[in-house]
Image (cartoon, rainbow, N blue to C red):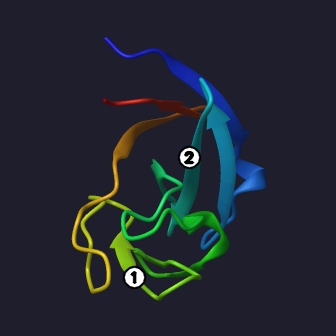
Amino acid sequence: MPDFVKVAVRDELPPGGKKLVEIEGRALAVFNVDGAYYAIDDVCTHDGGPLAEGDLEGTEIRCPRHGARFDVRTGRALCLPAIEPVDVHSVEVRGEDIYVAIED
């Protein structure tokens, strides 16, 4: 059973919001898509770009370096230059608190 770590409160992540967090030395991007929360590694699989610095449009995050897009729900790479998915992690909301567990 993965260990969940508190990473934010709901007020910090309004709909369309994103937040960069770190768990066990691993950078993660947490997103609020219309009240649903998702977490992915903050590393573009194309060249290691910081995904949390990109634009979030619906369920897609765009890497600010070369424009690769990923689905924040599944981690799937949606366009070139990325072809490999980004790792996704479990998110739980407990009251006003948002928790993430690293999934390997």
Q: Nearer the N terminus, badge 1 or badge 2?
A: 2
Secondary structure of residue under mark 1:
loop
* Rendered-image quadrant of the C terminus: top left
Residue at the location (62% across, 29% down)?
25
Look at 35% across and 47% down and name the residue there: 88
**Does 83 sit left or right of 32 as displayed?**
left
Q: Is residue 50 above or below residue 40?
A: below
Looking at the image, residue 63 lies above or below residue 2: below
Give residue 93's mark.
none
Image point (34%, 30%), residue name: 103
| Residue position for label 1 | 68
Q: Residue furthest top?
A: 1
Residue 30 visible within the image? yes
Q: Residues within 10 Å of mark 2 (few under 14, many from 20)?
A: many
Instruction: Indicate the amino acid at tag 1.
Output: Ala
* Residue 51 left/right relative to 9: left
Question: Mark 1 near mark 2, Cβ–Cβ under 8 Å?
Answer: no
Residue at the far right: name it: 12
**Coordinates of residue 9 in the picture (x, y in percent):** 73, 41
* Three-letter code, disc 2: Leu
12 vs 95, left or right, is right
Q: Residues within 10 Å of mark 1 (few under 14, many from 20)?
A: many
Q: Which residue is mark 2?
A: 28
Looking at the rendering, in which quadrant would you find the N terminus?
A: top left
Q: Measuring from the top left, give residue 22's x and y in whole percent.
A: 66, 37
